[in-house]
Amino acid sequence: MRELYLAECRRLLKPTLVVALLHLLFWMLISRTDNFFQTGYPLYMMMLGASMVAAVVLAVFQFLGYRDTSRWIWLLHRPLPRSASGGALAGAAASMIVLAVCLPTLLTVWGNEHLLARAADQRHYIDVLLLTLFAMMAWLVGAYVMIRRKYGAIVMLLFPLILLPRHASAYALLAPAVAILALLGYAMAASFKPDRASPPASAGALLATCAPLLLGCYWVLCLLMGLVFATSNIAAGKAGAGGMDVLDSPHEARASSPEELILRGLAHASDARAPLWREQVRLAQLDKRLRVERDIDAFPVHQLAVNLSWDTSIQDSERMQSWAFAHDAMLFRGTDMRSGGPGGTLGLDGVNGSTAFPELLSPLNNRLEGQTMVHFAAGAHGVFVFDQQHERLRKFITLRPDETLAGTPARYPQHIYALTNKRLIAYAPSLELAQPAQEQWSVALPYPLSNIKVVDCADVEDGVLVSFMSGAAWRDGATDNGQTLLFVAHDGSASVVARRQFTRGFPVLAAHMGWWLSPALHAVKALPDVLFDQGIVLDAGLTRYTNPLTMPRPRAAQVAALLCALLAALGAWIWVAPMKLSRPRKAGWLAACLLLGLPALATLLLFQTRPLARPLAAATPRAAAVA
């Protein structure tokens, strides 16, 4: 085993060193142009994808040498157990992945912390381990594809990406990542045998192989069906196509200005003051930039694996300082924007302070206040504003303990608005943002927060018109999609002026497509979001994110799910009928297709090869002549 391991390492060493050098050069470039520790989710996913693709290429290159039957037999029929031979190949590949993926990233983290004096959190070192584990998962998938010669099984690469939540703690991801790696390793080991074309004999190996295939096929089918629905919708000229009419659809909020939306709401109002309000709204010429948006979907959790966005620091352009939140110290650490060196700390007690903040803070999008750039830092229960004059973060908005911030504060001429998961709050327009905002009035949300798209406000003579546009969750099956227009008097009393429901949008089957394709797999895919804390801003009254599991399904989606299950079972029966399989295995496939729908049928087609129509010897003239 040792000799085979060393031989594989020597064979793979040169290309691995080239990949490691390119990997290290890329990270050095990122470190020179930006703060490596503040890279956002897109860059992390790009490097994760590149590492996984490189691992698949490694598996393809490694097993191409054993592709011929004679070489495969030579590999397995030697004075070594099959487990030892497979372990030597896997060990050599794991060593190369550590050399090409883990070591350059680890050197980059260490160099940024010790050579560039950028403070690293524990999560950055855990991320290196997670990146390596993902690359090893990809190698196992590539090895399985090459051994079984089932090229469609490459969809198994999606299995870890689907089951591991994106915004959970790095420590929380370690255990499921190791479990998925073990499952894929078991599936690859079960296929490492002389008869590569035959499925695994044991039930455990069969389940370990089919589980990644099932979720991969489910994701691909959802993607294909979504493309079909979107293409047909655009071709038919319905809502959602660029430049087409989107009135009375969930797309209306993004395509229309605040003035247009409020006027459409007033068209359904029976209030005697509606004509006067319409004239005042037209004269106001509302700016689309002054819009209260639900732009905070989640807050970082402690030791978050991947930053939620690119905007992870506060920029002090006057002193050329950049402040990024450190999870270990629970305060901001500074970086000199000119030299890239350390710039001290920013705590609750100001610059160079050491008092930790009570909760994790995230810098929000900058908002213009006159000619001055304003920087906000938000936690789940409050908003801080950066006071450049006194070099400290001051509490600007304090929320109730039972509510969570859901939108960046927006300043209108008459009020400052903040959106929470329970209400819209109007604050007095303070001339000095460093002073705490004073609440004037608030209104409860007419829709669940998860379904609210935008909120628009218009000041009129005797109060404020507030328009709530829903439809953000229509793709998840939300049915209460429309507009509610409220009038809020100066004393804070609110009354409903108008309501209207959307009558256009994608068909019901398109909105619930991920569910009716396979209700069971839809629930499995949603489980990580339900089980792991990802800092998601919850709807009022919820203590856990359960929206994908509790969303009501219409009768049409239920009928479609039943038809898909019956169609999958029929296809499975036609496929396995001529096969020489045991009755329990045939019954298991039929039951799986009936319970799991079309993804199970796709898995069966990829996994279980049908017998040839006639014997191979009779179909091959040379074989017949030899006989």
Image (cartoon, rainbow, N blue to C red):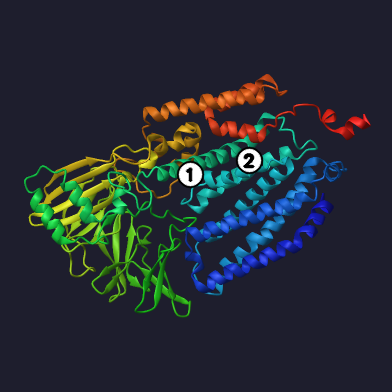
The kind of secondary structure element at disc 1 is helix
Q: Is residue 314 left or right of residue 448?
A: right
From this viewpoint, is residue 368 visible?
Answer: yes
Is the residue 200 above or below the residue 110 in the image?
above
The front one of 207 and 560 is 560
Q: Residue at x 19, y 41 (%)?
A: 499
Q: In x, y percent, where is residue 378?
A: 33, 60
Q: Residue furthest top?
A: 583
Q: Residue at x 30, y 72 (%)?
A: 373
Q: Is residue 592 left or right of residue 275?
A: right
Q: Local crowd at mark 1 within 10 Å, few (<14), some, or many (≥20)?
A: few
The residue at which mark 2 appears reads as 183
Nearer the observer: mark 1 or 2; the answer is 1
Q: Residue at x 57, y 54 (%)?
A: 130
Q: Residue at x 41, y 46 (%)?
A: 234
Q: Local crowd at mark 2 within 10 Å, few (<14), some, or many (≥20)?
A: many
Q: In x, y percent, where is residue 180?
A: 60, 43
Q: Is residue 372 left or right of residue 462?
A: right
The front one of 608 and 80 is 608
Q: Which mark is residue 573?
A: none
Q: In x, y percent, where is residue 252?
A: 29, 49
Q: Quadrant of the C terminus?
A: top right
The front one of 85 and 259 is 259
Is the residue 197 above or below the residue 32 in the image?
above
From this viewpoint, is residue 546 visible?
Answer: no
Disc 1 residue type (three-letter):
Leu
Q: Is residue 621 left or right of residue 415?
A: right
Disc 2 residue type (three-letter):
Leu
Residue 19, quarter of picture:
bottom right
Is the residue 308 above or below the residue 518 in the image?
below
The residue at which mark 1 appears reads as 227
- Please say if the residues under marks 1 and 2 sit with CB atoms less than 8 Å apart: no
